Image: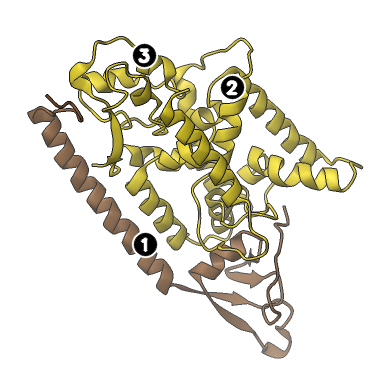
Amino acid sequence: MGRRLHRRRLAQILSLGLLHSSWGPELKWFCNPVLSCHSCALSWFACPIGVFTQYSGCHVFPTFAVGTILLLGVLVGRLLCGWACPFGLVQDLLYRLPTPKITLPAWTSHVKYLVLLGPVILLPFWLGESTWFSFCRICPASALQVTLPNLISAGGGTVGIGTAVKLGALAAVLVLAVLSTRSFCKVLCPIGAMLAPLNLVCFWAVQAPTADCTACGSCDRVCPEQGSPASRHAAAVAANRSLDCIACHDCVEACPSGRDRGRGGPR
Amino acid sequence: MTLDAPRPGPVLRQLLAHQKLLATLCLFVALGFLLAGSLRVHKVYEPGHEAFGLVTVHSVSDFQLVVDATCGGVRKQGDRLYSTYDRSETRGRRSCPT
């Protein structure tokens, strides 16, 4: 495991602890663009998806929330997906399980935009904030952080259809995370869909030492999003200038000619 | 020879300048949204207080409406937003109704 991967794992674990360590105080006016349910008893921040869904249902434009997401997105793009998202950590760890792996078709990465448009914005707008067709009703982070603990603390009991659907969605997402790397981020995550376009213009740049590139393909092999960073390295473009890049910097770490020289940071 | 960063050719240099312009524009738009959001106030009505034409209205900032959004603190009815809890009480932790 490379130094940078160690640092990333440490950052993810720290983020998991810090984001879920509220002993009472809350900063829920702040939408933190990572998948973490604000209904969790220990959460500090608001989930942008839950906030957007509620605002949409109330037919109110989420001015401050959009400003927060846009600001963080334009500063660091999807860096938080790679380094701070607790659900990303869960997927990274599950993918390490020794099972046969699959590669999802490239077109599946467009599904997340439909998820953002449908169950996050349009369906709550048409059907109201408490509709059964909102993303929160099937959110795997909510199922993991809220539904499951509530079910366990209630000692099991009767499981309603809504809970069963939510837990089923969680199980499907977790199984897919074992089989395909960062599958939820790539296919379904509406926060990723919000931040993805900002990857193309954000101030954060993942830079590999491209003058030494021997086209060995190491960067492509380690990319958790299977996003072919080699093609961007070859064109001397920052590796994160791609919709699906989570700025994990694994490609820079894997580069045999650039372990000490590749870097990431504000350009 | 130091090879820290990619050395952009003329096309890439143009692209980077274009991206920088877009990023700066996005940054200002984001700051504009934050400023507008911090100044914005919403009218939230108290339910069940409309007998005899008496209406209780709260002026709620956009910050507070984000907090309300995390716990289903408002609901839309007609053209109005109604509070789902007693705003005169000291606020404790609330969980999401979903």
Q: Which residue is mark 3?
A: A218
In front: mark 3 or mark 1? 3
Tell me, by letter, which chain the rendering colours yellow: A
* Residue at image coords 74%, 79%: B48
Q: Secondary structure at mark 1?
A: helix
Residue A95 numbered mark, or none: 2
Between A217 and A17, the residue placed more toward the observer is A17
User: What sort of colour scheme is used for the picture?
Assistant: by chain
Whether residue B12 sits left or right of residue A65 in the image: it is: left
Q: Which residue is mark 1?
A: B33
* Circles 2, 1 touching at the beta carbon (< 8 Å): no
Whether discs 3 and 1 lie on one chain: the answer is no
Classify B93 as above or below A233: below
Mark nearest the camera among 2 and 1 is: 2
Quarter of the image containing the C terminus of chain A?
A: top left
Can you give x and y, in whole percent of width and height, for residue A85 in the image? 53, 41
Q: In percent of the image, x 34 and y 42: which residue is there?
A: A198
Which chain is rendered brown in the image?
A: B
